[in-house]
Amino acid sequence: MTTTLERQDPVRTMLVRIAGEQMLQAQVDRQSFGGGMEASQVVLVTARYREGGLPRLLRVVMKRLQGRPAREAAIYEGLVAHCASRISPRLLAVEHSDDSVLLCLEAIRRTASWPWRNLSAGSELLVRLAHFHRIAGEADAKIPAWDYEAELGLLAEATWTALDRCRSQPGLSALARDLPALRRIVLERVRLREQLLAEHPFGCRPIHGDVHPGNVLVCRRGQGAEPVLLDWGRARLGSPLEDASSWLQSLRVWEPEAGRRHDTLLAAYLSAFGADGGLTSSVRDAYWIAGASNALSGALLHHLQRVQEPALCARRRGGAVTAPPPRGSVRAPPRDWLRVLRRASASAGA
Ligand SMILES: Nc1ncnc2c1ncn2[C@@H]1O[C@H](COP(=O)(O)OP(=O)(O)OP(=O)(O)O)[C@@H](O)[C@H]1O
Ligand SMILES: [Mg+2]
């Protein structure tokens, strides 16, 4: 859609800020990426203009954020600028207004809509993630405050309630078989989290906090294709194993081969991180607790609420419990998250 924007239009104002007065005459197209779960609006902006008589093109992404997600601006300016500039879009400008923040980011041109069939691309992402975790652990980058542990506690309780409710619902009662595993993790959450955040050599350090295929693009940069991590709004202090698990557990939903080669991929991450002992039983246990934390931090609750919507008929409800959602759009369906909780429960008892 082509729009002739007014001078005071925030998109136009942003374009003028990053590319000068010539943007006042540019023809501007906007293409929405659709509302995400967190951002209020993500738009690809294409500006066509003339410079020295020659036609030029400027493509940027603008992301408007409100409420807690607005912390992403400070994360780009701090953590990403210091520790993750090679694996992120460049932040071109930030505009603060009374109730929201507008981020202007380098538009990443992806090489393929689904580059993950090739497992080496997924492995490369893990290697780069490990390097980021190492650098971020040593740097002194500021991250906006977020009492994640308190929020996790509330979401874990709500997830327990939602799973308990499945017992009496047609098509969902099989899910409730995993109630004992979930109950165990929720009741022991504080101890398990302390143990996870003390696991050597990972400890507690800055992490991305939302690594899944919807938040990674592969683009051509330098010599070859490189994965780029988007969506830094959930970056926080945590265990790097939370990021590694988030990636591996979401990838295997769409690429079963990633499940079959799970330990090889995890070993690639551990080696790049410099965890010399490799996949010891202690690291494996911590990894599953990290996965359970991800399950309980809203992802499983979101899906349980979706499958319990009254409008969903019993047949579609059964499908939503097991069928993979559209590639990369959301993360694993309930069945997969519950599998992670079973593994974590076994690890918690080990
Ligand atoms: N810099 C960028 N270059 C190219 N595409 C981008 C860029 N930033 C975002 N996108 C596209 O917009 C989509 C949504 O962006 P992003 O994940 O940052 O927002 P979000 O609303 O927080 O998403 P969600 O809550 O669904 O994870 C991405 O999946 C990607 O397709
Ligand atoms: Mg996203």
Image (spheres, rainbow, N blue to C red):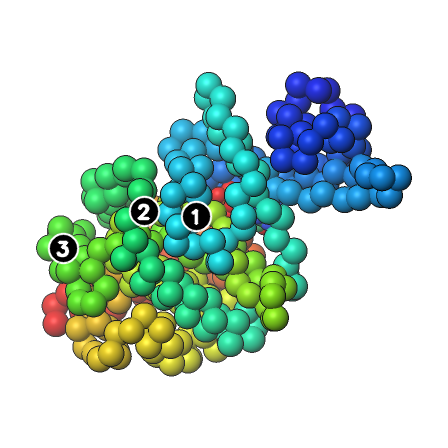
- Tag shown at residue 81: 1
Q: Amino acid at mark 2?
A: Ala
In the image, residue 94 above or below residue 197: above
Secondary structure of residue under mark 2: loop
Q: CA distance from mark 1 to mark 2?
A: 9 Å
* Quarter occupied by residue 308: top left
- Asked if disc 3 and disc 2 are in contact, CB closer than 8 Å, the reply is no
Mark 3 and mark 2 lie on one chain; the one further toward the N terminus is 2
Q: How crowded is the residue under tag 3: few (<14 C-alpha within 10 Å), some, or many (20+)?
A: few
The residue carrying mark 3 has its beta carbon less than 8 Å from ligand 1: no
Cα–Cα span, label 1 and label 3? 29 Å
Q: Quadrant of residue 59?
A: top right
Residue at 18% in and 57% down:
197
Q: How many residues crowd around disc 2 within 10 Å: few (fewer than 14), some, or many (20 or more)?
A: some
Q: Nearer the viewer, residue 14 or 258?
A: 14
* Marking on residue 141: 2
- Label 1 amino acid? Ala
Q: Are marks 1 and 2 in contact (CB under 8 Å)?
A: yes
First in sequence: mark 1 or mark 2? 1
Q: Residue at x 56, y 73 (%)?
A: 117
